[in-house]
């Protein structure tokens, strides 16, 4: 099966829509009583505005660039090393999304410990101190933020 696509158009359109949605969400997510030009919404608007401008540039580049990439999907391509590397990236992203979901349900300490263990298992770490050092750092970060700085963690 052959697919022709232009990655600049796809990524430019996706991130332009994401920037527009985030731009519209800023007033409801960052409440401010200030009436000055520079307030709590300024930096997020600059960042998301930049994201929107660069996404628009990428979209226009994809529209006006003539050669499109052609992808041929075969059984041999699905078992290649390049495909396996991409699949590892997708699995890693799924682990991070699971951490994000677990963070709201289990809190910082338990979900971060589980994330640390999952990542180390994913990369095949076998030595005990590969686990001990990051887990101790999770405890240190929790202690510093929760006990010393009195910052509420999820």
Image (tube, helix red, strand yellow):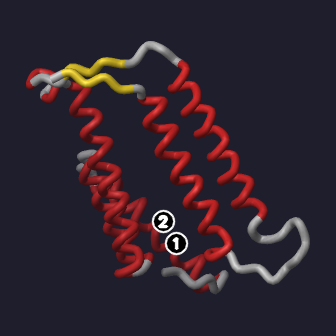
| Cβ–Cβ under 8 Å for marks 2 and 1 | yes
Q: Who is closer to the viewer here, 105 or 50?
A: 50
Q: Position of residue 70 (x, y in %)?
A: 30, 18
Question: In the figure, residue 128 lies in which quadrant?
Answer: bottom left
Residue at image coords 27%, 41%: 88
Residue at image coords 29%, 35%: 86
Q: Who is closer to the viewer here, 30 or 90?
A: 30
Residue at image coords 81%, 83%: 33
Q: Residue furthest top?
A: 67
Q: Which residue is mark 2?
A: 137
Task: Look at the numbered disc 2 and give the secondary structure of its residue.
Answer: helix
Q: Position of residue 134 (x, y in %)?
A: 42, 60
Q: Which residue is mark 1?
A: 140
Task: Look at the numbered disc 1 and give the secondary structure of its residue.
Answer: helix
Q: Residue furthest right?
A: 36
Packing grade of label 2 (10 A; few <14, some 14-19, many >=20) is few
């Amino acid at each position: 099966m052959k697919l022709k696509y232009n990655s600049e158009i796809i990524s430019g359109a996706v991130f332009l829509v994401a920037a527009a949605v985030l731009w519209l969400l800023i007033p409801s997510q960052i409440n401010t009583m200030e009436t000055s030009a520079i307030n709590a919404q300024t930096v997020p608007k600059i960042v998301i505005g930049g994201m929107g401008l660069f996404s628009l540039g990428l979209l226009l580049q994809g529209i006006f660039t003539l050669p499109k990439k052609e992808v041929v999907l075969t059984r041999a391509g699905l078992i290649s090393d390049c495909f396996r590397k991409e699949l590892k990236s997708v699995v890693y992203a799924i682990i991070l999304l699971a951490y994000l979901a677990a963070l709201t349900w289990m809190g910082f300490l338990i979900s971060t410990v589980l994330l640390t263990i999952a990542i180390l298992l994913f990369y095949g770490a076998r030595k005990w101190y590969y686990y001990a050092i990051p887990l101790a750092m999770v405890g240190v970060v929790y202690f510093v933020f929760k006990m010393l700085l009195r910052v509420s963690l999820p």
